[in-house]
Image (cartoon, helix red, strand yellow):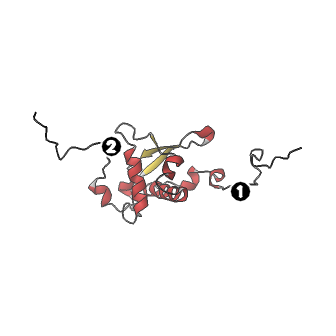
Amino acid sequence: MIKKKKNRNSIDGDFSYIEHNTINSEAWKGLKAHTKWLYFEYKLRWYGNNTRNIILTYKEAKKIMSIDTFINDRKLLIERGFIDIIERGGLEKQPMIYGLSNRWKKYGTKDFIKADIEKIFSEIYTTKFKKDHKFMGNRFKKKEHL
């Protein structure tokens, strides 16, 4: 029986790539390793036809990095023009929808359009609530037994 030779150039499973002009851009320079890794996570969820419909939930992000790191790196990717927020989500456990962006190509020039993260997220989403905070009927209220 003749065995087929495996093609050394074949790729098994999902893969992602970064173009040379992305790596050599001003926007890419100075990014930390985990920020670049997060960008790869967004690129892994891109299938060619969902450029404006990429979902990365907090639960999925927590598997690869801490939530605080994820939030800071996501903010940096938005500010540098690599990703955009298409739909905010959050209400009734709807996921946030992201899109890949080409704004990074103009980063550092006068034509660059800077996304202000503070306008995207209102104050209520950036406020961290404490355990006894009075919010939505205080669901953390201690129950008294008879």
Q: Is residue 32 visible?
A: yes
x, y percentage for residue 145?
86, 45
Label 2, secondary structure: give it: loop
Name the residue rendered at 49%, 47% in the picture.
Answer: 60
Q: Residue furthest right?
A: 146
Spatial CA distance of label 2 from label 1 is 41 Å
Q: Badge 1 is on which residue?
A: 130
User: Residue 98: x, y in percent?
Assistant: 47, 45
Q: Give the labeled residue for mark 2.
A: 14
Question: Which one is earlier in the sequence, the residue at label 2 or at label 1?
Answer: 2
Residue count near mark 2 (Cα–Cα under 10 Å), binned few <14, some 14–19, many ≥20: few
Number of the label disc, if any, that sits on residue 65: none
Return the residue found at the far bottom. Answer: 30
Of residue 141 and residue 45, the one placed in the foreground of this image is 141
Mark 1 Cα-neighbour bin, 10 Å: few <14, some 14–19, many ≥20: few
Q: Residue furthest top?
A: 1
Q: Describe residue 4's horizontal placement relative to residue 113 as left or right.
A: left
Q: Measured along the vertical axis of the image, is residue 29 above or below residue 140? A: below
115 or 83, which is in the foreground?
Answer: 83
Q: Residue furthest left?
A: 2
Q: Position of residue 50 (x, y in %)?
A: 40, 38
Type of amino acid at the residue the image marks with label 2: Asp
Left or right of residue 143, residue 59 in this image: left
User: In the displayed structure, does residue 61 sit left or right of residue 13?
Assistant: right
Residue at image x 85%, y 47%? Answer: 144
